[in-house]
Image (cartoon, rainbow, N blue to C red):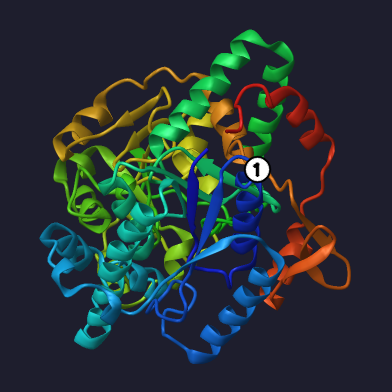
Amino acid sequence: MGNVFIFNPVPLWDHHLAETLDLAIDLSKKYNQIFIFDCNKKLKHCPANIYNNDRICENCLGRQAKIKSQSQFQRFKFTDLSEVDESKKHDEEIASYILENIDHDMVFIRKDAFFEMSSSSEKDLIYFSAMTLYLQVIDFIKKNSVDTVFVWNGRRIYEKMVIMAAKSLDVKVRTYISGPKIGSYVIVDDDNVFSLKHIKKNVDEITQRCMEDEEFRELVFEEGRKFFENQEKGVVDRPLGIANFSNQNNKIFSQIGTRNKKLLSIFTSSLWEKKGISEFNHKVYLDEYNGIQEIITDPDILRKFDIAVRWHPALKACTGKEKKIMHDIFDQKSESIMHVKPTDDISSYSILEHSDFVVTFGSTIGAEALYRQKKVLLLSPANYSHLKGVMQITSHAELRDALDAPRQKIDMVEVLAYGFYERNRNAHQFQHISIEHQRKLTFSYLGEPIVDATPITHRIYRRYFYEKNAFVKRLHSIYSDVFNRD
């Protein structure tokens, strides 16, 4: 086969580096040449070093040097802008895209969905690094006959530049990210690792297999229920990947008003977390806060319902303008509205139990509400948008009408298939990199240590270390023929 380029801009992040190496070793058995990205200290404001700290850069270079000495892979060396032909810097469409998305990485660091960089010099650094990367990847693909590009994550500006460069040449793009368990990673045949199309395809295949295979169905039901039970208990099923904010809050929700009206519960998502993921862009309102404001001030809705707004626990970390907008909404007092703040220890499941209708902006609680046979109205695309029983709303007027409509039929097989998928995500277990977990956590290749975990990763692993238990062995024997590994 041809040649592969793997783009991972965060070699300092232990598990992401280990999964990149395992993927590269695996691909080397199928492709002629494997090229791995090397930022060469030139990529400004990278995800692992957003403030360009020299010490962090040196640590990263040292780690990359060790990897180079222990592996056969060739490197794509990023150079600075002066080495790019000036005549190639005038792609207006790409320039416009970079400028529109330039704040996204800082949004995730600042935890403020509305954050905008005020420093023109910082913006210039990111802009020119992004444009340079885009142009260099195009040249590199052409010169080295690369026919497949693997991109880690894909949500940040530099990852998007590599994806756009590959797509401009009709080169196949696949994305990858950590799996739900330590020592695993997910590969998505899409330029978006959060692809809703990919999730739907997997859940549909699992659901269909349940109809045909009784033993597999029993496994799906068992693990699907475990997913939903663990969510309620606050057991973190997925220590890696998107931040998991599960908590076991035990305080019971107290009823609003006189209970003469039905209870409409709104469960927010965390807007700053979703910034930069186009799949989750809002379709109904300007943004989530605008949507909440419209709902809780709609006289027709307030006439019929009491409203409980459960603010996502991750929002307790938000800052800046996003925090101010959220608190401005808190301050609007009404006897028909109760705000359960991010820091409140009221159980979301206690709220669910009392709810007649559940409105969500994409939070996993929407799928959990389906599991509890609740009427679910979804105001933003989500991993479970396709599940039967979810009413995907496209306008505020449609939301009003949907509140009067009967609940749609829920397919519990499909709901449990979704829970099963969330627990394993069809992840690939490490085949070449082993995890040594004794006095010190180490990733090894052929018996030789290749990545020593940082203290923070070691703490995560101590708590969530992945053991190959009976479920995994059973899963592999039943599940391996459903999805073939390319």
Label 1, on which residue? 29
Residue type, mark 1 in image: Lys
Quadrant into which the C terminus falls: top right
- Tell me which corner region of the image, top left, top right, bottom left or bottom right, holds residue 144: bottom left
Q: Residue furthest right?
A: 438
- Nearer the observer, 176 or 355: 176
- Nearer the observer, 129 or 103: 129
Q: Is residue 181 left or right of residue 41?
A: right
Q: Residue furthest front?
A: 143
Up the image or down, 449 lies above or below 473; here it is below
Disc 1 crowd, CA 10 A, few/some/many (<14, 14-19, 20+) = few
Q: Secondary structure at mark 1?
A: loop
Residue 275 screen position, x and y as percent: 33, 59
Up the image or down, 144 lies above or below 325; here it is above
Residue 123 visible, this angle: yes
Task: Name the residue rendered at 71%, 52% in the picture.
Answer: 183
- Nearer the observer, 423 or 263: 423
Residue 337 screen position, x and y as percent: 31, 54
- Tell me which corner region of the image, top left, top right, bottom left or bottom right, holds residue 405: top left
Task: Name the residue rendered at 37%, 54% in the picture.
Answer: 141
Residue 76 screen position, x and y as percent: 46, 65
Residue 104 screen position, x and y as percent: 31, 66
Task: Name the residue rendered at 33%, 47% in the picture.
Answer: 280
